[in-house]
């Protein structure tokens, strides 16, 4: 993506996140996103087929950034989310959530959190599957791996919900430790 395309994509993400914080997902129109982002309809559709794809792309950008940060030599890829990543992918994610990068917490705590969490869980499962070595020795041999991966993702989501409900009092490092103990 060139600089102009990145700026347009970021404007669309920002407009969409703001609208999600204000109203139900089903009530948001592409026209409202266009007006907030100050772009033409054709420009929107050049980036996203529908608003469903837009929501999924927002989640994917976050997780792609997290995955890239865990690699020894991350590929040259500019993300909506920028930072110096720690070694742990789960800690990295908690840190972004703590900073509320690009208002991701609006998605988690807003009216549309179940929709967002659906995409979030799907991508978390991919992340958990790539990080299974962190949980070595904890899985019973008879337990199917796909069940284990879903369990790890669900535990992360519930840890995150608990943290949000408690006002995010704990640091990302402490929360990551709680999560690790709970799996």
Image: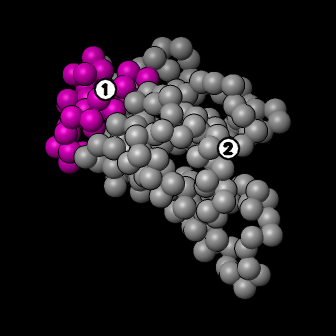
- In the rendering, at what x and y percent does residue 90 appear? 64, 46
Left or right: where does residue 37 sit relative to residue 160? left
Please tell me in which quadrant of the rendered image residue 8 appears: top left
- In the rendering, at what x and y percent does residue 23 appear? 19, 39
Q: Establish if 51 lies above or below 131.
A: above
Can the viewer see residue 47 in this picture? no
Can the viewer see residue 90 in this picture? yes
Closer to the camera in the image, 133 or 67: 133
- In the rendering, at what x and y percent does residue 82 appear? 59, 24
Label 2 sits on a secondary structure element that is: helix
Q: Please check the rendered image and state whether residue 6 is part of the magenta-colored stretch, yes or no.
A: no
Which residue in the structure is indicated by mark 2?
89
Residues drawn in magenta = 10-38
**Which quadrant of the figure contains the C terminus?**
bottom right
Q: Are marks 2 and 1 in contact (CB under 8 Å)?
A: no
Q: Main secondary structure of the magenta part?
A: helix
Tell us which disc is closer to us: 2 or 1.
2
Label 1 sits on a secondary structure element that is: helix
- For mark 1, does the 10 Å Cα neighbourhood hold few (<14), some (14 to 19), or many (20 or more) residues? some
Q: Residue at x 62, y 43 (%)?
A: 174
Label for residue 15?
1
How many numbered marks appear? 2
Q: Establish if 16 lies above or below 35.
A: below
Mark 2 or 1 closer to N-term?
1
Q: Establish if 3 lies above or below 41.
A: above
Left or right: where does residue 100 sit relative to residue 23? right
**Which quadrant of the figure contains the N terminus?**
top right
Q: Residue at x 81, y 32 (%)?
A: 73
């Amino acid at each position: 993506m060139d600089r102009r395309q990145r700026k347009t994509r970021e404007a669309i993400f920002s407009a969409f996140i703001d609208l999600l914080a204000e109203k139900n997902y089903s009530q948001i129109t592409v026209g409202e996103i266009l007006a907030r982002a100050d772009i033409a309809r054709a420009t929107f559709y050049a980036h996203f087929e529908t608003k469903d794809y837009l929501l999924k792309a927002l989640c994917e950008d976050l997780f792609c950034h997290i995955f890239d940060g865990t690699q020894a030599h991350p590929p040259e890829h500019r993300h909506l989310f920028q930072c110096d990543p720690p070694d742990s992918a789960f800690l990295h994610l908690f840190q972004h959530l703590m900073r509320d990068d690009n208002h991701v917490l609006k998605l988690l705590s807003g009216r549309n959190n179940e929709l967002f969490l659906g995409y979030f869980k799907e991508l978390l499962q991919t992340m958990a599957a790539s990080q299974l070595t962190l949980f070595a020795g904890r899985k019973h041999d008879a337990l199917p791996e796909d069940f284990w991966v879903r369990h790890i993702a669900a535990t992360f989501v519930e840890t995150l919900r608990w943290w949000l409900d408690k006002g995010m009092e704990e640091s990302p490092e402490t929360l990551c430790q709680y999560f690790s103990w709970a799996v």
